[in-house]
Image: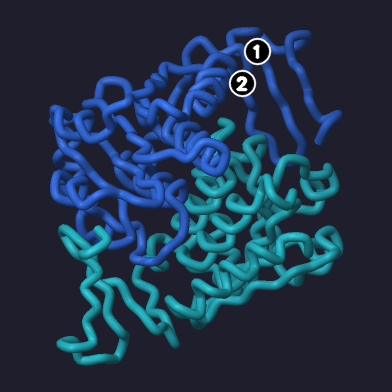
Chain colours: A cyan, B blue
Amino acid sequence: MHEEPEVAVLRYGHRPGRDDRMTTHVGLTARALGADRVILPDNAGQSKETVEDITGRFGGPFGVELTDALNAFIRNWEGVVVHLTMYGERVQDVEEDVRAVHEETPILIVVGGEKVPFEVYEHADYNVGVTNQPHSEVAGLAVFLDRLFDGRELDREWENADRKVIPKATGKKVVEPGADGGASDADATEDA
Amino acid sequence: MHEEPEVAVLRYGHRPGRDDRMTTHVGLTARALGADRVILPDNAGQSKETVEDITGRFGGPFGVELTDALNAFIRNWEGVVVHLTMYGERVQDVEEDVRAVHEETPILIVVGGEKVPFEVYEHADYNVGVTNQPHSEVAGLAVFLDRLFDGRELDREWENADRKVIPKATGKKVVEPGADGGASDADATEDA
């Protein structure tokens, strides 16, 4: 987030078709929960488009890139590499260390698909398990980011959005940011 | 979790094929992050099987049910209903209230698919947004559970598991629970 060392998320592996929604959700979760950019495998162009579309409408800054060299990207990262895996150290045991490191150093968070090669485990500075149970790479990423930023990401402001959701106890309210309310409100309760 | 009022997760809506993995991930995330059971639409039988299979191998207790009456299930819930939606109140504003309520009262967390009818918004005691940005119902559920349980879910013990992952800085280690180590260790580094 702003004025902090960068946090990037790398999605390791993507099977077009089968993984489209999971990869898209990794990208959207990275954006919504405070990462600065996401790096996707080069066969995930459709997910890239979706995440860019959301960024265009709901604001940024947030970067989306494709790479054909996942391993090289990890190897060449100038900072700390955190690999999220159910086999790793417990997040509650390492998060304080990682938060301290992040005060000075960019962090790359690697989020696996089905098969992550052993060299990723070896190259990672931290292999971290958000529980040591099988669940969801999207869930693991979400909890990790929330803990890395200690909740600050929830107060993030968005730039260049053309719409903004106003929190509401019941129903839906969407406005144009910067508008003074009134006629520019688009109360979307009709589809609620 | 044990000795606390129940937390159940209801997946609202499921499109077979398209939603299979998302619904499965909702179920697995509910299990891994401290909920007691998940309720799925009755056309999500495949996700039910997957979650039950994981519970059989990695332990429980955790319940999986199908229902053909999502709205009635919500209406008849004897406790508090929390509906996760990007249009809702900010999680950081309501989580303290919800935690206090949960000390005495079972909670049903409703996790939407694409189209949640307005009556769910109306019936919910809390409509809650984990950010007011579009991202992932799996990510929202994960952050909400982690905050509801205040991290306690990460220390949960599992019963009747036939395998257990031992946290490890590098590589993979899986053992049979209750075994005294040694020959029963199944060090799974071969596929890391």
Q: Is B182 left or right of A157, judged from the image as shown?
A: right
Horizontal and vertical percent position of residue A31? 52, 67
Q: Secondary structure at mark 1?
A: loop
Q: From mark 1 to mark 2, how far is it between C-alphas? A: 6 Å
Does A4 appear above or below B147?
Answer: below
Q: Is A129 left or right of A126, judged from the image as shown?
A: left
For badge 2, the amino acid type reads Lys
Does B163 appear above or below B165?
Answer: above
Residue drawn at x 48%, y 40% as measured from the top left: B15
Horizontal and vertical percent position of residue A123? 80, 53
Badge 1: residue crowd in 10 Å (few <14, some 14–19, many ≥20): some
Residue drawn at x 27%, y 61% as measured from the top left: A191
Residue drawn at x 59%, y 41% as measured from the top left: A129
Does B169 appear above or below B3?
Answer: below
Horizontal and vertical percent position of residue A171? 19, 60
Q: Secondary structure at mark 2?
A: strand
On residue B164, the disc is: 2
Residue assigned mark 1? B176
Disc nearer the start of the sequence (1/2): 2
Quarter holding residue A86: top right
